[in-house]
Image: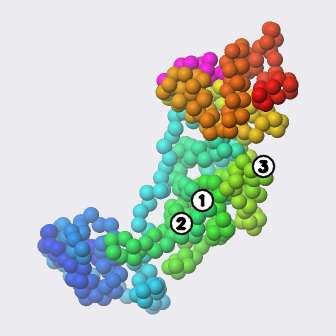
């Protein structure tokens, strides 16, 4: 007898509004030849007709004529139902353990400000193929790695699950574990298992922040069925399931110290990713489109400010690549500046507020550079026009040194 059959039997054999105790429910299920504990948990799982009205008391909101229990079906002999031994020496039937909710599985909302660029088309093709193709996306912070995967799923109307990794993330967080819910011990499936069963995209965000506790995912990254050690259940990935991970490093740690929490990932783990995608900061024209879209969402029409912001960030990044400075302004931070400007209507004030996290010397250099660019004439490529012809976006080395070392 499955859950629905058991529910229908109880509703048909109780008066509308009748309240039964936990003991009465277990006695009735036992009389039907069902393990009383298993029957009780099957019955109260998720049926709106059965309402918990107190500790161990349930109201059945339906009426109907009593019907006899269904005759037992004749089936081929099967192995005994697995039983899980708990720490308190009690036993829980495997049928009594299940997922509690699927709130983390959803189709992302389409962001109207998102601009498709960079590796977006490749990520979209991977997701659209519905092939199992584990992909590792690496790139500096704030360049749109996570949003790229999210918006690709949104555009394709694909369900996805986002798992945020930290040094404390372990097998219990990812695969699942026992939880005490309404006085009952229930095995709650983790986001990885839910993604496998639903055939959706599993986004593992900031995977290089993990420890060796995530080695439990090695089997998952092979696309094969995995065994839930705590229940004995074997989970087979549904069609369309795939894993995409994002990180600031390629699993070798951060030598320059920018990402101090980044860990060195086991080589056997990394080897299970089919492809590694490098996501860079967007080029000038693309970044301008991104900021224009964000400005529009905040009702900002100061196009001149957008031009100067993008030119400013490009000079900073080129200087960073040349090892002239130790920090960089990300696309995400430029969007923060746009938001601050929408509130305070002050160009330099918005920039000051959003670069305050940097060290004082770097912060002052960034502000001085913006002041210089804000007072200059720019061409259509964001290059400073000096004495008529367009000058290089990156001034001569001596000028850069004087700007960033004041």
Residue 44 vertical position relative to residue 349 in the rendered view, above or below: below
Horizontally, is 251 left or right of 88 in the view?
A: right
The residue singled out by tag 3 in the image is 256
Quarter of the picture holding the N terminus = bottom left
* Circle 3/circle 1 CB separation < 8 Å: no
Residue 143, x across and y down, in percent = 66, 41
Residue range in magenta is: 299-308
Task: Judge the density around disc 2: few (<14), some (14-19), many (≥20) Cα neighbours within 10 Å.
Answer: some
Task: Judge the density around disc 3: few (<14), some (14-19), many (≥20) Cα neighbours within 10 Å.
Answer: few
Q: How far is disc 1 from disc 2 in space, using C-alphas?
A: 11 Å
Q: How far is disc 2 from disc 3 in space, using C-alphas?
A: 31 Å
Residue at image coords 60%, 59%: 166
- Label 3 vs label 1, nearer the camera: 3
Residue 52 vertical position relative to residue 320 in the rendered view, above or below: below
The residue singled out by tag 2 in the image is 173
Residue 121 visible in the snapshot? no
Numbered badge on residue 166:
1
Q: Is residue 129 magenta?
A: no
Q: Main secondary structure of the magenta part?
A: helix
Q: Is residue 305 magenta?
A: yes
């Amino acid at each position: 007898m499955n859950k629905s059959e058991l529910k229908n039997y109880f509703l048909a054999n109780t008066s509308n509004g009748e309240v039964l105790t936990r003991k009465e429910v277990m006695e009735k299920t036992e009389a039907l030849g069902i393990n009383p504990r298993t029957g009780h948990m099957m019955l109260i799982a998720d049926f709106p007709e059965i309402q918990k009205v107190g500790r161990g008391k349930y109201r059945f909101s339906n009426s109907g004529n009593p019907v006899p229990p269904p005759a037992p079906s004749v089936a081929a002999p099967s192995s005994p139902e697995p039983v899980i031994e708990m720490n308190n020496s009690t036993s829980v039937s495997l049928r009594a353990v299940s997922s509690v909710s699927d709130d983390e599985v959803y189709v992302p909302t389409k962001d109207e400000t998102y601009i498709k660029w960079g590796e977006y088309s490749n990520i979209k093709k991977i997701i659209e193929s519905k092939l199992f193709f584990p992909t590792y996306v690496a790139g500096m912070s704030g360049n749109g790695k996570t949003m790229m995967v999210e918006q690709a799923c949104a555009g394709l109307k694909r369900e996805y699950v986002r798992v945020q990794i930290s040094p404390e993330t372990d097998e219990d967080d990812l695969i699942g574990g026992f939880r005490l819910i309404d006085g009952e011990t229930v095995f709650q499936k983790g986001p990885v298992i839910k993604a496998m069963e639903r055939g959706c995209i599993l986004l593992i965000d900031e995977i290089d922040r993990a420890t060796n506790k995530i080695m439990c995912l090695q089997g998952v990254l092979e696309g094969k069925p995995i065994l839930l050690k705590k229940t004995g259940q074997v989970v087979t990935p549904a069609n369309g399931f795939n894993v995409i991970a994002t990180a600031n490093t390629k699993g070798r740690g951060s030598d320059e110290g920018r990402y101090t929490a980044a860990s060195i990932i086991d080589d056997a783990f990394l080897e299970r990713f089919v492809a590694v995608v490098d996501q860079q900061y967007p080029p000038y024209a693309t970044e301008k489109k991104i900021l224009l879209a964000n400005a529009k969402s905040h009702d900002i029409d100061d196009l001149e400010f957008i031009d100067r912001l993008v030119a400013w960030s490009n000079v900073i990044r080129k200087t960073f690549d040349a090892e002239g400075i130790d920090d960089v302004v990300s696309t995400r931070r430029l969007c923060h500046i746009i938001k601050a400007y929408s509130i305070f209507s002050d160009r330099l004030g918005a920039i000051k507020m959003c670069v305050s996290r940097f060290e004082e010397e770097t912060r002052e250099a960034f502000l001085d550079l913006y002041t210089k660019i804000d007072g200059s004439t720019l061409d259509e490529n964001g290059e400073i026009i000096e004495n008529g012809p367009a000058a290089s976006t990156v001034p001569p080395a001596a000028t850069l040194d004087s700007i960033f070392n004041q």
